[in-house]
Amino acid sequence: KVAGSSGKLSDFTAGMLEKSNREKMYTDASLRKPYLFFVNRLMRETELSSEILAPIQAALKAYPESRRMRLRSSTNAEDLAGLNGAGLYESKAACLGDGDNSDDKDGKTSVCRTSLEGSRMQAQVKELRALKDEDGSIKKIADEVESDINKKYPLKHTIRSVYASLWTERAFLNREYYGMDHSKIYMGMLVHPAFVNESVNGVAVLNFNEDKSIEVKIVSQVQDVSITNPIIPGALPEELSVVRDAAGSIKLLKVISNSTLVSAGGRVLSDDRMQDVTRQLIIAGSALRAAHGGNRYDLEFMLDENSKVLIKQGRPL
């Protein structure tokens, strides 16, 4: 049920997904965009039932209110044969210490914002504002980062935002392209502590070979700077080609590229760090392989502020 209305979200989506209308939405962006914008907005305003909210609130009581959590989306429209679906649906941060009526403009940071995060964001703003900006795009990024310093993460808003990502344009078009029944798409949420205060973040692809060797391609970047969508324009990650031979020895084969955020001659992953990261990736990848089979795996990892390796997630390729 939509807050402040007698209408139901399901009634609107049923009409939107009638065959003739759905086909027009697929081919006509001028029709598709307003429909999806409206249903996305409706989902963000929909009242949450106790069946959804209560179990999440109960589970989060195991953590302090100052611990930011991650609500990770998972649907039956991804990780299918021939359809990866990565990036179609959104995962969001939540903070129990940020009340439902939290105000991003009150001049206060989120209860869950760490001091290291805040100082890093301020440094990013300063760095961005020092860059040459011919069209104003960098100023816009800097303004967004500065605004996010005081961003709040109320739980109810986060849950609704994750569910609303069912109706992003990219998700709708993908399901329509693959002939999926939109009315039979379901979403669950995995809730876990958010990864904060990263000293390194990265992704890796592992290839398990018949000769018992394991090839590992590691792409990493400093701190929490995104590899695929960096906040610093033009920032490129470090790429390493590594192998663990059949005897168990780990060797760096090649530095494919250096991070542009590291001083000349430096590395995001030193030799010692590379060895440690590779060992942990192989342990995690081998466990996944034992459970799911296959010879190729994609994993995401980080190093915390103490350089401890944490494996975030992994999936077969």
Image (cartoon, rainbow, N blue to C red):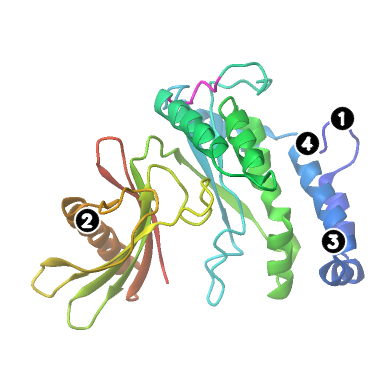
Left or right, 222 with reference to 235: left
User: Which comes sooner in the sequence, label 3 or label 4?
Assistant: 3
Tell me which segment is drawn in magenta: 109-114
Q: Give the quarter of the image for residue 244.
A: bottom left
Q: Nearer the viewer, mark 3 or mark 4?
A: 3
Which numbered circle lies on residue 274?
2
Question: Callout 4, which amino acid?
Answer: Glu
Residue at the image position 76 percent from the left and 43 percent from the top: 43
Q: CA distance from mark 1 to mark 3?
A: 25 Å
Instruction: State yes or no: residue 111 in magenta.
Output: yes
Q: Residues within 10 Å of mark 4 (few under 14, many from 20)?
A: some
| Front in this rendered view, residue 234 or 117 | 234
> Which residue is tagged 4?
45
In the image: residue 79, left or right of residue 210: right
Query: What residue did someone put label 3 on?
Result: 32
Which mark identifies residue 4? 1
Give the tally of numbered discs.
Answer: 4
Which residue is most to the left? 247
Mark nearer the N terminus (1 vs 2): 1
